[in-house]
Image (cartoon, rainbow, N blue to C red):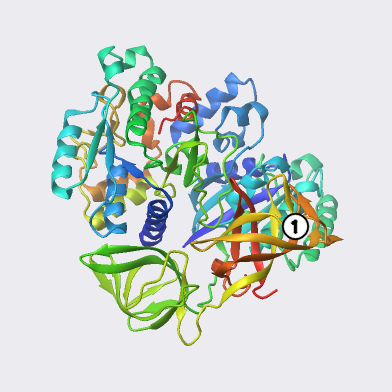
Amino acid sequence: MLDLKDLENKSLYILRESYAEFKKPAVLWSTGKDSTVTLWLCKKAFYGKIPFPIIHIDTTYKFKEMYAFRDKLVKEWGVDLIIAKNEEAIKDKCSPADGHFECCTRLKTQALMKCLDEHGFDALILSIRRDEHGIRAKERYFSPRDSEFKWNYKDQPLEMWDQYQSITENKTHTRVHPILHWRELDMWEYIKQENIPAHPMYFARNGTRYRSLGCEPCTSTVDSNAATIDEIVIELRESKVAERSGRAQDKENAFTMQKLRALGYM
Amino acid sequence: MNINVVIIGHVDHGKSTLVGRLLYDSDSISDGRVQEIQKLAEEYKRRFEFAYFIDSFDDELKEERTIDTTGVMFKGKHLYTVTDVPGHKEFIKNMLTGASHADIAVLVVAASEGIKEQTGRHAFLIHMLGIKQLFVIVNKMDMVEYKEDVFQQVKTDVTQLLASLGYQDVPFIPGSAMEGDNIYNKSEHMPWYNGPTLIEALDNTKLSKEVKRLRFVVQDIYTVDNEKVIVGRVESGILRKGDEVTFQPSGVKGKIEKIKVYQDEIDKAEAGDSIGIIANCLPQRGDVCGPSENPPVTTERFLGEAVLLDNRLEKGDMVELRCGTKKAKCKIEEIREKLNSETGEVIDKQPKYINEHEAATIVFATDPMVVEEFYDIPELGRFVLARDRNIAAGIVLETSA
């Protein structure tokens, strides 16, 4: 296994670099395991008090339990929460029936764009990992988004030896990916080691569980009897099922994820 | 142990195929992914390619070439992070990004083609990056009927190229990533070869790291419970509570009163640790801290070697130089020697400028800052240059030029 201490050390370094280099960063939180670990890493990096706001993109399609989990943790950790919604799309009754690409773009990407515009954030800390998806595997730790919010994946910055490019001219913002190098298994081992709150939906009930959490209509369970963190760790060591196999937007067609991400999706 | 391996070599010599093969044979691919790739191959009306496990952009698949670097993990005796890099010259920037954290490089040379432009350039660049462990895969042996004499010829040529860069006794493995020969499983097609497969060679690798003198870089100063916490990372050596330390270029001195990791206090921290320290002095972001009896030395002029990844760099240009957490204003004072980035040979002295993908030894005049010689403390002996973007990468040859 990867040494959790090494993974954490690098993440803390990245978080502190982003806070030092950008004027107005913010961190995205879906309430899922990855971004909850990132919040925990922020607490560690900044000695308890996260010095920037936390953005939750509310598509209104999240599971009820996710909202409850969110509100509980906000209270316990005392964080500064911003809820981002694309009210116009919600009014239009935008839904997955319009197609995953359309729905994710309007309810997530555009909600995020509006929030960014309103608050003027120049850096967004996101919890994507290389092992989740081939397109995410191509990312940099600091990944600029151009003046139109787009990811120019054909011309990414030189990023060597933890010298992350933080130049903000002609960029709407820079994406910061502090856990890019972690694997799904590492996440769970770390959650256990640090005793980080994890969503009950990740644990098996009646032979199924969620491996990745998203919007209710587009997220499905995997067969599993792993009802504790230890059992999840054992399951992941053996499993050959992809983590995001229950996420519809990844699979619509081969390049939906690339197109979504090029436009600014997470 | 986690080992970072970068796969390098000329375009179409089979780097992505090799990485795909390693993942496939080590059973590291999820079930859904194999089906996805099969479907994709049908869509493109092509044969199933192992490279498709790695190449993810539609442009990469359509054009059958890797554009950007990818890191994947698989398990052998060690846990490997394998980095695939593009083989085209126009993507050297991405190749360097992928190679910069590698412990080991695997140079892929197609038996059917031998040395090509990026074979030399990639070897030169990983040499500059200080990657000492290197293996050569003579790939596509299936295309030369697994003939030993072809392997020997390529081996002779590549050995000579590598020797000019200072690589001696490099192991060569004949193989075929496409057919699975000597990558993860032993080949039955080359009875004349008795050496290890690639995975055996990797599994037998030992990495050693010397403990050097203490260097800690300052990222920031936070106020926590009315205390000033100096946060940063130990780059080399060991930092202990009670140490007398000096921060440069600020020049402040103090004693380490506490080492803090979140809510815990620890007595010592080692290379790689992200920590906070409390000391009776106030340094700045960009400072480097070392023991007061052997403190870091501030410099304003040093000799480095760099490779350019932007249009042109001229003598007299002002750029930003980044080393550790320091960003310094920097003037290109003198371009001493231009190097052939395929062989390392000197091709020009005192040129006025260098162009994209060219390398040179350069005298840099900077704001006061701390750098170390690369062979001594690599973590503080490497730097990037930036203008409106990161444009070059380099190493420090002499701290006083």
Residue visible at 47% across and 88% down?
A: B293
Q: Residues within 10 Å of mark 1 (few under 14, many from 20)?
A: some
Image x and y of residue A132, in percent: 42, 39
- Is A23 or A225 nearer to us in this picture? A23
The answer to whether residue B327 shows anywhere in this view is yes
Coordinates of residue A110 in the picture (x, y in percent): 37, 25
Disc 1 sits on a residue from what chain? B
Out of B359 and B36, give the one closest to the viewer: B359
Count of marks overlaid on the render: 1
Spot occupied by residue B109 in the image (x, y as percentages of width and height): 75, 49
The quadrant the N terminus of chain A occupies is: bottom left
Name the residue beneath numbered marker 1: B315
Q: Quadrant of the C terminus of chain A?
A: top left
Q: Residue furthest bottom?
A: B293
Q: Which amino acid does label 1 sit on?
A: Lys
Describe residue A134's horizontal placement relative to residue A249 as left or right: right
